[in-house]
């Protein structure tokens, strides 16, 4: 192993896999860290890096013609507008903070730097592994790693590395502590000196699954990262930390067994081809555990999104003022049990006027007009009702889609959001109870 190509790391497990069996004789290690990478990457450099990938792709693989695709990427990369405390700001330099494109563009930019410049500086004798802006370098003992850093920093005045060298044969990198031994590298979980183990308390109102998930996460990480020599110590550390947070010992130990099983089966599977797992996001509710159990025998895994927090309810309560025109509504049919479900930000009455105009002008783009055409059934205007109000667009669209997925309707498409019927039902129940809570909150706030 050596040289810089294929330096990109996916996670700390990937790191461990790559370092397995690396001899550390006459070698030392350090980490280089780019100072605030995202804001320092020049936008034209990022665009060039994306272009170098896109130009080599089959046009079939792209969702759009190559030229249009790059035009869109360029627009996104150059769009640095953001709101802070109600004011609009424009970001002058670097990639937009918080844009999902930025991480990809920054990585590609770094790859170009590595290929074009850094590889000449690093040479073929060193190992260079990078996770976004963190680089691990392992080099022969005689290498002056600080001098290497100065050379790297001269390449591009905006991309400046800081250095952390090993201390007594130890170096923290990502969430792993690398330990140099005569037999090669050993690993254990790294915790920052400021770490205080203040995770979710067992008595907190989080869903049971979330709490179990946190504990599981720690055990899984221990099994994945720790070399045998350090595993027992880490497991004991985790048990003590969660006992202190009020978790029952029996629960902790059973989660530990479960984690062990998971690691065991995943290591068995490792030899075989890697299977891709798809996840389905489910809103939190009482029944969600049953659904997840049902899915266990299938290829689909489910993840639970966090439930409604008190803060969310208060926020949506206050947001509702002045947003009563943002609604999801239902217009039933006079002659069958179907209904039309829709959403708008301009209020139900405006929408009814528009529907009536569509009928008059026989506009077949409106599903309601099609139903009248096909069956002779008329909409029951006087029973049109608002189902939910005061949400933003994304929520409105997903609620509308949930109704269309689960209720008899005359809409001709499922809406802009695809639901599985089971999760749409759970989500609707959640929204309906949220609505009841908001009604109650407003009722309390209204002076008598
Ligand atoms: Zn009908």
Image: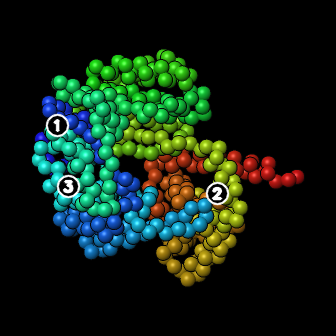
Sequence order check: which comes first, mark 2 or mark 3?
3
* Front residue (pair 327, 162): 162
Sequence order check: which comes first, mark 3 or mark 1?
3
Q: Residue at x 44, y 69 (%)?
A: 92
Q: Would residue 250 be found to the left or right of residue 296 on screen?
A: right
**Marks 1 and 2, how far apart in space?**
67 Å
Q: Are marks 3 and 1 in contact (CB under 8 Å)?
A: no
Q: Is residue 368 above or below residue 100?
A: below
Question: Residue 113: where, in percent of width, then height?
Answer: 23, 59
Q: Would residue 231 be found to the left or right of residue 202 on screen?
A: left
Q: Quadrant of residue 332?
A: bottom right
Q: Quadrant of residue 86?
A: bottom right
Q: How many marks?
A: 3
Query: What mark, if any, has residue 388 been given in the picture?
Result: 2
Q: Are marks 1 and 2 in contact (CB under 8 Å)?
A: no
Residue 352 appears in the picture as rendered: no
Query: What mark, if any, has residue 118 been given in the picture?
Result: 3
Indicate which label's residue lies in the foreground, 2 or 3. 3
């Amino acid at each position: 192993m050596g040289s810089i190509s294929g330096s990109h790391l996916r996670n700390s497990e990937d790191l461990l896999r790559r370092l397995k069996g690396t001899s550390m004789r006459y070698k030392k290690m350090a980490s280089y860290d780019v100072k605030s990478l995202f804001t320092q990457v020049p936008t034209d450099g990022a665009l060039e890096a994306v272009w170098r990938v896109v130009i080599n792709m089959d046009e079939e693989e792209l969702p759009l013609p190559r030229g249009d695709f790059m035009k869109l990427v360029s627009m996104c990369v150059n769009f640095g507008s953001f709101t802070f405390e109600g004011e609009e700001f424009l970001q002058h330099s670097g990639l937009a903070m918080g844009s999902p494109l930025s991480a990809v563009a920054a990585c590609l930019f770094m790859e170009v730097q590595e290929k074009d410049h850094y590889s000449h500086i690093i040479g073929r004798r060193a190992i260079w592994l990078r996770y976004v802006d963190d680089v691990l370098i392992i080099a022969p003992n005689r290498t002056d790693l600080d001098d290497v850093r100065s050379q790297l920093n001269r390449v591009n005045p905006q991309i400046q590395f800081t250095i952390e060298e090993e201390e007594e044969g130890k170096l923290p990198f990502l969430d792993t502590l690398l330990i140099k031994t005569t037999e090669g590298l050993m690993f254990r979980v790294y915790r920052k000196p400021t770490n205080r183990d203040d995770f979710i308390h067992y008595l907190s109102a989080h869903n049971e699954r979330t709490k179990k998930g946190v504990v599981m996460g720690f055990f899984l990480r221990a099994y994945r990262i720790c070399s045998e020599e350090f595993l027992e110590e880490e497991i004991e550390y985790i048990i003590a930390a969660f006992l202190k947070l009020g978790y029952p010992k029996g629960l902790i130990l059973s989660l530990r067994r479960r984690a062990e099983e998971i690691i065991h089966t995943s290591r068995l599977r490792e030899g075989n081809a890697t299977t891709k797992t798809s996840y389905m996001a489910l809103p939190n509710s009482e029944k969600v555990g049953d659904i997840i159990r049902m899915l266990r025998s299938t290829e689909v895994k489910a993840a639970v999104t966090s439930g409604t927090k008190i803060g969310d309810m208060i926020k949506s309560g206050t947001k509702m003022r002045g947003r009563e025109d943002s609604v999801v509504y239902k217009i039933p049919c006079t002659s069958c049990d179907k209904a039309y479900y829709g959403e708008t930000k301009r209020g139900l009455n405006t929408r009814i006027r528009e529907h009536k105009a569509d009928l008059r002008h026989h506009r077949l783009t409106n599903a309601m007009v099609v139903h009248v055409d096909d069956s002779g059934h008329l909409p029951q205007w006087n029973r049109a009702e608002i189902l939910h109000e005061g949400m933003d667009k994304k929520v409105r669209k997903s609620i509308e889609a949930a109704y269309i997925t689960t209720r008899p309707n005359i809409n001709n498409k499922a809406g802009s959001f695809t639901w599985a019927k089971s999760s749409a039902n759970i989500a609707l129940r959640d929204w309906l109870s949220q609505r009841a809570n908001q009604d109650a909150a407003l009722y309390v706030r209204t002076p008598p």
